Structures are given as structure tokens and as C-alpha cells.
Amino acid sequence: MIDHLNRIRFNVPDMDKAKKWYTAVLEQEPIVDHHLQVVFNAGNSWLTIRSGNPSQANSSLSPAEYWLVDDIDGMFEKLLKSGAKVHSEFSVTPFGEKAVSVRDPFGNIFGIMENKIYKEGRLVESKPSRTAMGAAFFRAIAAIEEDKAIGPDYLAALFLSKEMKIILEYPEMRKWAKKYRAPSGLYEYMCARTMSFDRYYNEALKDGCTQIVILGAGYDTRSCRFRDRTGKARIFELDIPTTQERKKEVLSQANISVPDQVLFVPINFNRDSLEDVLFNAGFDKNQKTFFLWEGVTYYLAPQTVDHTLKFVQSHSSKSSSIAFDYVAISESLLDGYGVKDLIGYMQSENPGEPSRFAIEECRIESFLSERGFQVLHHQTAKELEQKMIKTDNGFSGKITAFFCVVHASGGCPFV
């Protein structure tokens, strides 16, 4: 059965010119830059350019690949100004989307189509995050496991829909959900990720952090689960207002009080200034701070990731640190366990929250070093399998191959 497109390959006669052209058009650096191939993160897929003759150079047929864009007229104008040529005029699909195709300066043909989901205001900003609820669903299933170390989030079930709560009640339905409701390795990754970030969170409190900033908090429950360890530390939970309001409402209905030192700070990471938002909320750059960035980076534009890391590096004390998870990318990992399943799942289940950011495999140390950070601890999917989800009771499993977790220090030495 055909699922989803996840890789596009274009042959180009001049690799250097093509890399520069697509870097300018996509407004991002390649995630893989090799003399044999260059890979860009293009929406929900990866665009690979290689040296060779374009297979479509003499084609008059419609393009096989279309990218969704938020502003089709603006993007079409940008492509033409950058040197692309019109391949076909504007048309309207049977579903009402405007579409047009172009030929790049190297002979490859592709199309762009208006993103009706974006246009109709159904992105994550306009409603509580589906991915936040999906993550809570898997944490809630894990919390019912016999080994409580696998599922420590005993509050996750509060945030679920009625249908999801019904699934929790029946062992066979939970088994079905883990196997068929999630792509291969995602449930196991959620378990390992929760355990890993729980550890970083508690270590930060133990090490004397007086501020914790949770970037993209979603339905994170650590401020409630670990309230007895928080002391006087302030916790800033940053996320979109719709998700935050639902979170507060659910906790209130369950008679669960939020600790006084927790501040809910609304933000749109792709649009708002992290500096303005945090400082307006009372953030103190001179205090030792732990930044927790769980399950977020792959939904952000690369420049947003850079802006966030720049803020952490330049506006926090040198004893501060950040932990985040990310997608590692390489040709071999694209064929790794569960990767194609997950890409297809994200495209179909969460079209309003597309995956955007990845780091080239084995480049995490140089990536962070270039941004002023030093890796303290790093775990690949295989290392997470071995260290986080193998227990005395025998629970183990394979994790989607391209997920990694990193903890790094890198506050400003002058703060």
C-alpha cells in the first residue's frame, strides 16, 4: 500500500549553484551538505539534490511533486524572481486549492499548492495541540504498565478525550493502540523521552536551579508531579494560549492545584520574540536556569530553533543548561526502524503541525558548539533503547531510529 511521499530527488548539472539557489528559495541551510548530495528539509519531506541530468528536463507533463505553501501568490512571485520559469499556469484542483508549477534553473519541475488548512485557520495556534494530546495518550498508557518506571506520568490521562479514556480501560485496546495507533517505535520513544526528561528536570532542581523554563510545555505535568522537590524555584511554562487554557481548565476540574511558582506564559514560537515574552513574564537572566524543550524542535522552522538557542546562550547564566530532543537525518536513518511510518503518520494525522527541523546525523556536537554550547549528555535511539526502556521486568522495545535526546550547557560567560 502506498503511504506518503517522504523523499524527493532532483538531479542538477551544477551542485554548487543548485545548493545556493535552493538555500535562498527555501530560506534555510541544507541539513546534509556533502559533495555527493545535498539534503533540505522541505515541508514534510526531504529534498535531495544530486549531480546529474534532470530526468524531467523535456517533460511537458504535470509535475509529480507539489509543496503546500501558505501564500501561493507570494511564493510563485519569489520563484520567478529567483530564476524559475513557468511550467504551467494557475489552476484549481477538484478540492478547491490553487496550484501552479515551475521549472527550476536546473531543469527540474515541481508544483506549489495553497495550504487550505493554513488558510482556513486550522493550524495549532487556533486550537489545543493534537500532538500534545497524542503525547499525553501514550504517557497515560505507559502509566498503566506494571513497571511504574516506564510510565511515571500518572496525571496524563486527565487530558485525554472520552474516546482515548475508553481505550485506557481495556488491556486489549491498549495493546491495539500501542501496535496500530502509533507508528513503529513511537510509543517506546515516548516512554524513553518522558523518563529521560524527568531525570534532567529533577537533576536540575537538585543542582540548585532557581528557574526552569519549559519551552512548548503542552500537557507537561512535572510541576505538579514533582512539586515536593521544587522548593522556591520558579517554573515558566511556555506554549500557545489554546493549549494552556485547556490545561488549566482540566487541572481545575480535577481539583489539582498548580504550584504558586508556576507561570503560564503564552507564546507562538514561530512568530513571537522569546526574549520579549520571557522577560515580560519576570525571567531573570542572572539566575541558574534549566531549559526543557521536549517534543518541539521538529515542528519549528530552522531559524526559530537558532533564535531559541541564541536566546538561551546569550540571556542565561553560564551555569544554565538546556535539554531537548530532535530528529537526526541521514540517508541510512531515513530507511531506519519506524522512520517512514512516522513521517507518513505525521503528514496524515497532524497536517497543521508539520515537521520542519532536523540535524545531520553525528553533527550534534559541532551544531551546538557553533552556537556556543557544550554537550553534557547525548543519547541516540539505540542508546535510549538500552538505557531507558530496559527494566527489571523485561520491558524493552525498539525506538523510531531518528530520534535523539541531548543535554547541553552554554549560558553566557558574562552573565
Image: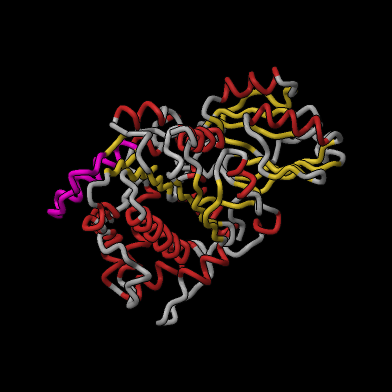
Q: Residue at x 28, y 41 (%)?
A: 244
* Front residue of this view, candidates 279 and 222: 279
Q: Is residue 371 left or right of residue 166?
A: right
Residue 85 position within the rendered picture, expressed as x and y whole percent measured from the top left: 75, 23
Position of residue 22 relative to residue 146, above or below, is: above
Queried whether the magenta region covers residue 200, the answer comes back as: no
Question: What is the residue that sits farthest to the front in this orientation?
Answer: 414
Q: Quadrant of residue 227?
A: bottom left
Image position, residue 38 (x, y; %)? 74, 42
Indicate yes or no whether the magenta region holds residue 244.
Answer: yes
Q: Residue furthest bottom?
A: 393
Q: How many marks?
A: 0
**Color style of the picture:** secondary structure
Q: Position of residue 370 (x, y in %)?
A: 62, 39
Q: Nearer the viewer, residue 336 or 373?
A: 373
- Where residue 324 appears, as percent x and y from the top left, is 47, 50
Residue that appears at 46% across and 66% down: 188
Tell me where the magenta segment starts and ends, as one range.
Answer: 240-263
Q: Considering depth in this image, is 38 or 387 the residue closer to the camera?
A: 387
Q: Is residue 307 visible?
A: yes
Image point (19%, 48%), residue name:
259
